[in-house]
Amino acid sequence: MKKILVANRGEIAIRVMRSAREMGIKTVAVYSEADREALHVRYADEAVFIGPAPSSQSYLVMDRILQAAKDTGADAIHPGYGFLSENATFADSVKAAGLIFIGPSGDSMRMMGSKLAAKATAERYNIPLVPGTAKAIESVEEGKSIAQKVGFPLLIKASAGGGGKGMRIVLAADEFEEQMKMAVSEAVNSFGDGAVFIERYVGSPRHIEIQVLGDRHGNVVHLFERECSIQRRHQKVVEEAPSSVLTPEIRDKMGACAVQVAKACNYEGAGTVEFLLDENLDFYFLEMNTRLQVEHPVTEYITGLDLVKEQINVARGEKLSFTQSDLKIQGHALEIRVCAEDPTNNFLPDIGRLQTYRIPQGPGVRVDDAYEEGMDIPIYYDPMIAKLIVYGKDRQEAIQRMIRAIDDYHISGVKTTLEFCRFVMEHPAFTGGQFDTHFVKNHFSPDLLQKNDSGEMELAAFLAVKMLREHSTPMQATTQEAAGSRWKNNRLN
Ligand code: MV4
């Protein structure tokens, strides 16, 4: 493998290119009209323009991307996450064009893309599933009779859904028919596949996922778990590894189940097997994500591995260079997603220019981003500005380091989720490890931020200093920048 085209943008494109460069592999970026000045374009050895800003006309157009690979002589394509990363047709087309797809086969993706096929496969290997059905419900009558056995509340889920899409809760029998009809029509409209199934509703679950890695020779290992329970509307906000609740026994069992799921679909590359964990610490297989995930860095920190390098190695046909018993959890890692959203206004996306943008540094701090001060956040894509990842010898040190890193992160011009993430880090339910997927709904309200808005305090102090300087010694504080940096220095001294 000599040249990789990265079919993505933003932080993940740069993340992939960094590993490729360390391995002596050239990189090709693709970019849309909105990304002419983007950092992933500058970071790559070459870049190819692929179309207008909307991703449906650029990052999602398979032929454009395949043509760009052909034109630049790339011999492999890395899809990143999102966009075409879980598109089985794309994986097949890359292979058909004589290129290496850095990821699983189209067949593995198809099997796991169907939640029903995935559940049926897991069932054959005696992997625990939430009580319900691993078969499509054929009629309202059949559904009602299964619902009576499963009990209420229950969930109707779309087989082609995932990540929370196409899910409906049914609280009692008299709602079943209406909810099932809605679920089916939604599934047809959104996915072109009306197959639905039933699961008992787990009321207070934690979301735990296991990172797996497989090679072409049938070897599969797991790289332990990530806990992603702190989320909002299915958007993860905080991720950590290891989970604060898993015992070594549950971890081993869950890991073995995840490896089994991956083996059952001949999985090659990096993938993630998702589980729900209930209050009794019983776990249930939910689905498998057939891509590198946003939160992969926490796993990299606790295992010392570079997951992109591992993906590249197995895509070249190499055997995994380690076995399960070589792997050990070391320390604790946390990740927060720094998004251009206003946590005081229902997390409304905020666009605009990064007037100030300074990232935290120091031991155990990693920032995966694709922005510089002065850049605009484009409206066309994900509002994530950066991922802030920290590592510590234990969970407490990681939390304290995260708070320090958040305080060292300076962003102005757009509203961000930084202060909200700081709130999470200090909340007793989080520090005590007593939380589930309802954390944000149960513990957060915007007024809790405003009370403690150090950003606003800083701005007030900054303006006061600026006014003083402008009135007393105008030559010393000519720009906001200069006044701002003096204020920071004052504080440090
Ligand atoms: C569930 C559930 C409760 N019971 N299934 C949402 C995302 C998708 N992967 C599965 N999801 C859920 N499935 C049963 N039987 C609750 C959720 C769920 C959830 C899961 C993980 C992380 C966040 C979540 C937020 C709301 C609901």
Image: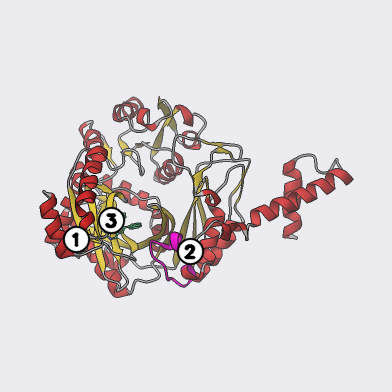
Badge 1 or badge 3: first in the primary sequence: 3
Residue at the image position 50 percent from the left and 45 percent from the top: 348
Q: Quadrant of the C terminus?
A: bottom right
Observer able to see residue 189 = yes
Checking the image for residue 169, the label placed there is 3
Observer-nearest of 282 and 452: 452
User: At numbered mark 3, what does the secondary structure look like: helix, strand or loop?
Assistant: strand
Q: Amino acid at mark 1?
A: Gln
Separation of residues labelled 1 and 3 (CA atoms): 30 Å
Q: State the residue position of label 1.
A: 260
Checking the image for residue 162, the label placed there is none
Q: Amino acid at mark 2?
A: His
Outermost residue toward the front? 174
Outermost residue toward the right? 472
Q: Around disc 2, counting alpha carbons within 10 Å, would you say few (fewer than 14), some (14 to 19), or many (20 or more)?
A: few
Q: Are marks 1 and 2 in contact (CB under 8 Å)?
A: no
